[in-house]
Image (tube, rainbow, N blue to C red):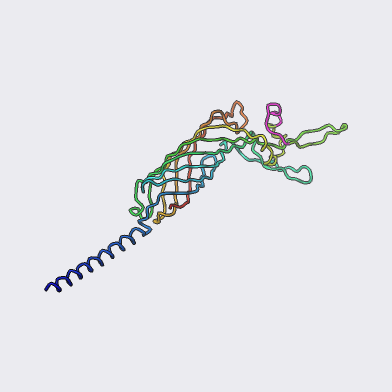
Amino acid sequence: MGEVSNKKRYWLIAIIGICMTYTVQAQVLKEINPENVVYTKEQSGDIRVHTNGYALAYNWGEIPTYYKTTYYHIELGRMFDSRESSQNRNIVYQFNRLSSSYKFGKQNDFFIIRLGKGVKRYVTDQAKRKGVAIGYNIEGGADLGVLKPYYLELIYRVDRDGQFNAEIRNERYTPENADKFLNYESIYGRAPWSFGLKEISLAPGLHGKSSVFFALGSNGQFVKTLEAGIMADVFVRKIPIMVETEAVKNRPYFLNLFVNLQFGKRK
């Protein structure tokens, strides 16, 4: 009888061991299932179009919980003035070279480098929304505005031995040449973009943005987000994109609506 009891005990221990083995294996399989992977880091890139320009950006951050991501942000963008308008006189000068298009009254090209920190929060779960999660994003940080003088090709009449000849000069706006720079008949076109690179000036500032986003796809490993919101940039001085006149005034701030596409990966 004792031997039978020992055999039963051994069989019971064996059955319990087998059950525990299957339970552990099932738990491991569940943990490595992509739907249950816990991600801790995120990297992504942005392609943004806003009311008066565009930008490209890179983001990297931490994921403390499924519903929250804190990140850092670096961006290069370009800002236009809403009053800019391209035009071309379509005239021919030396060597049959057709005049180039230009923007009348423009004084500087303006670029912005943005460094920021933000937080994204999900308010829904992807699985419950058939692969689409909804959330909001808040970000703020420092700006560095970059102003590059805008050069025009201006037509001058030059007296050479009693004969007047046309001559083209590449010039930026100054109070001294305002009569030429703002005279439609004196403008041949825009000078090559390289003019002004050695005369860049800087303007520090701050930025902030707020948005809602829609995270697409059921696989949480990849970042595929459509975002829309409002953003503001404020600088320590006026940004002279256009030549100021009584009717045209520059300002130290920009307020824009934007749409952003974001792609990246979590790990």
| Image quarter of the N terminus | bottom left
For the residue pair 229 and 101, the one nearer the viewer reads as 229
- Residue 124 in the figure: left or right of residue 76: left
For the view shown, which residue lies furthest in the front direction? 2
Q: Residue at x 61, y 39 (%)?
A: 85
Q: Which residues are magenta?
A: 170-180
Q: Position of residue 242 (x, y in %)?
A: 61, 32
Magenta region includes residue 179: yes
Residue 97's image quarter? top right
Magenta region includes residue 226: no
Q: Position of residue 12 (x, y in %)?
A: 19, 68
Q: Residue at x 48, y 49 (%)?
A: 44
Q: Position of residue 7 (x, y in %)?
A: 18, 72
Q: Is residue 241 above or below residue 75?
A: above
For the residue pair 187 and 24, the one nearer the viewer reads as 24
For the view shown, which residue lies furthest in the right direction? 161
Q: Is residue 29 above or below residue 163?
A: below
Residue 186's image quarter? top right
Q: How many marks?
A: 0
